[in-house]
Image: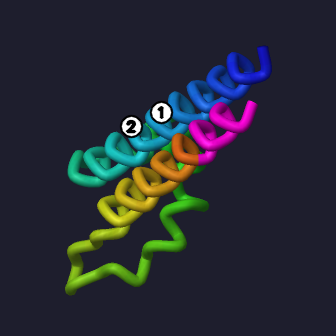
Amino acid sequence: MLSTIIEMIAKLLNDAINVYVFLIIIDALMSWLPGAPSSKLGQLITRLVTPFLKYFEFARIGIIGFGPILAVIALGFIQIGVNGIANFLITIF
């Protein structure tokens, strides 16, 4: 019973991380399209991902920013951690 709840929570967190990664990728692609970031959808996505991307603003070479790539990699590590903790908790219970 408890292991099922842990699995459901882990699945929910994994899905949320996947959606956030998708939003970061969309935000990065929108920066290449003129006018896309100023649309309603673009503004919404920018408001959602900017707080997390600010941690990775240091990753610039000239005008090219590698922040979104580092953010996706960091979220991948977070996802690995979530899965590891979930698997550990399932083996305990």
Residue at 29% from the left image edge and 81% from the top image edge = 60
**Pointer 2 residue:** 22
Of residues 43 and 59, the one drawn nearer to the viewer in this rendering: 59
User: Main structural element of the magenta stretch: helix, strand or loop?
Assistant: helix
Q: At label 1, which amino acid type do we have? A: Val
Residue 24: x and y in percent read: 40, 47
Does the segment drawn in magenta span residue 87? yes
Would residue 3 appear left or right of 21 to someone viewing this image? Answer: right
Q: Where is the C terminus found, in terms of image quarters?
A: top right
Q: Which residue is drawn at 60% across and 61% down?
A: 51
The quarter holding residue 44 reads top right
Give the residue at the far front of this rendering: 92
Magenta-colored span: 85-93
Q: In terms of depth relative to the viewer, which is nearer, 13 or 87?
A: 87
The span from disc 1 to disc 2 (Cα, nearest Å) is: 5 Å
Q: Say which residue label 1 marks.
A: 19
Mark 2, residues whose alpha carbon is within 10 Å: few (<14), some, or many (≥20)? Answer: few
User: As shown in the figure, which amino acid type bears the numbered disc 2?
Assistant: Phe
Q: How crowded is mark 1: few (under 14 residues within 10 Å), some or many (20 or more)?
A: few
Name the mark on residue 4: none
Name the residue: 71% across, 37% down. Answer: 92
